Image: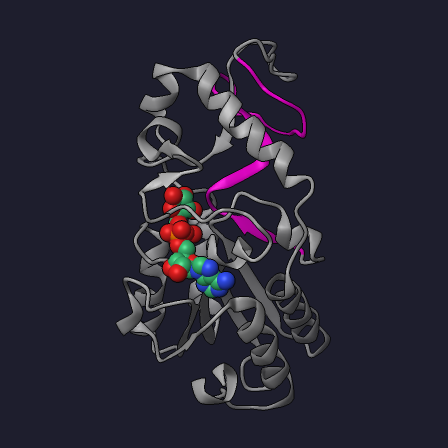
Amino acid sequence: MKYQKIAVLTGAGISAESGVPVFRSEDGLWEQHRIEDVATYEGFMRDKTMVHNFYNTMRQSLKSKVPNPAHKALTKLQQGLEAKGGKLFLITQNIDDLHEKAGSHDIIHMHGELNNILCESCGARIPFSDNSSVESVCPKCGRKTMRPDIVWFGEMPYRMDEIERCLGECNLFIAVGTSGVVYPAAGFVQICKHLGKPCLEFNLEPSAVHNMFTVSYYGKAGTTLPKFVDYLLAHDDLPSSKEICK
Ligand code: APR
């Protein structure tokens, strides 16, 4: 198999068909809230209770969400590659657990996870499925300094060293359902392109960095990605966009 080590970056678009709202809606709001209120540390300092509740609501609604064919296709790709001695590096900007629910493993959640909570005092990251508040106590240090384990604007994403190694090691890079406006993730395609790796985009429409990609497959990821994965596992070359998007 030609493409044995594949890095995949997923964004909100992959979960859209599972009913998880994307970030950049036309009105510029995220779930009816201004991004600066619910996705910055300053917003959290202004109103901790509102921010806790915002993520509580999302965490609870996630419980009924199920993976769609795009998540399942990536699980199939991971299993297919591993059966042939290859590897899938699955990097997601998403804070949902739909890749896990689809059966994928070793997922890098670079922007944190709804199903974790973070202690500002001791840095503990605790698996969490309940509701948090300013009264929540850290099970490690005992302080009431818990916050959502979400990487907000201006904060450093998780596991960047590891991600750089994955991008260096892969021989194919694929971005799925991401608008390409939030860095550093939006810059991964540039890194891979400069390293001479083919780069593929799966999105509803051209992203902000679409001109960096070798091939783009436009359409719903739940339709295009399963077709692509079936093709890739059976062939040594990449399918044309006509083949996948027809
Ligand atoms: N299939 C494929 N692509 C889709 C689908 C679909 N069914 N539905 C939507 N999309 C595309 C949209 O066209 C858009 O380009 O997915 C992209 C989603 O973009 P954003 O909402 O900007 O999400 P994302 O790129 O993941 O955002 C990055 O920004 O707010 C921060 O930290 C947050 O991780 C998030 C980051």
Residue 45, image x and y in percent? 36, 16
Give the quadrant of residue 86.
bottom right
Judge whether residue 93 is colored magenta: no
Query: Can residue 177 be seen by looking at this rendering?
Result: no
Residue 8, image x and y in percent? 50, 64
Query: Can residue 52 be seen by looking at this rendering?
Result: yes
Residue 51, image x and y in percent? 45, 23
In the rendered view of the protein, which quadrant contains the N terminus? bottom right
Model colouring: one colour
Name the residue located 49 percent from the left edge and 46 percent from the top edge.
Answer: 21
Q: Nearer the viewer, residue 151 or 216?
A: 216
Identify whether 62 is placed above or below 69: above
The answer to whether 194 appears left or right of 234 in the picture is: left
Name the residue located 59 percent from the left edge and 80 percent from the top edge.
Answer: 227
Q: Nearer the viewer, residue 178 or 118?
A: 178
Question: What stretch of residues is rendered in magenta?
Answer: 105-133
The answer to whether 40 appears left or right of 140 in the picture is: left
Name the residue located 50 percent from the left edge and 53 percent from the top edge.
Answer: 92
Residue 72, image x and y in percent? 66, 64
Count of labels in the image: 0
Q: Nearer the viewer, residue 40 or 80?
A: 40
The answer to whether 63 appears left or right of 209 in the picture is: right
Name the residue located 35 percent from the left edge and 26 percent from the top edge.
Answer: 37
Q: Nearer the viewer, residue 196 or 137?
A: 137
Quadrant of the image where one finds ligand 1:
bottom left
Identify whether 34 is placed above or below 89: above
Judge whether residue 121 is colored magenta: yes
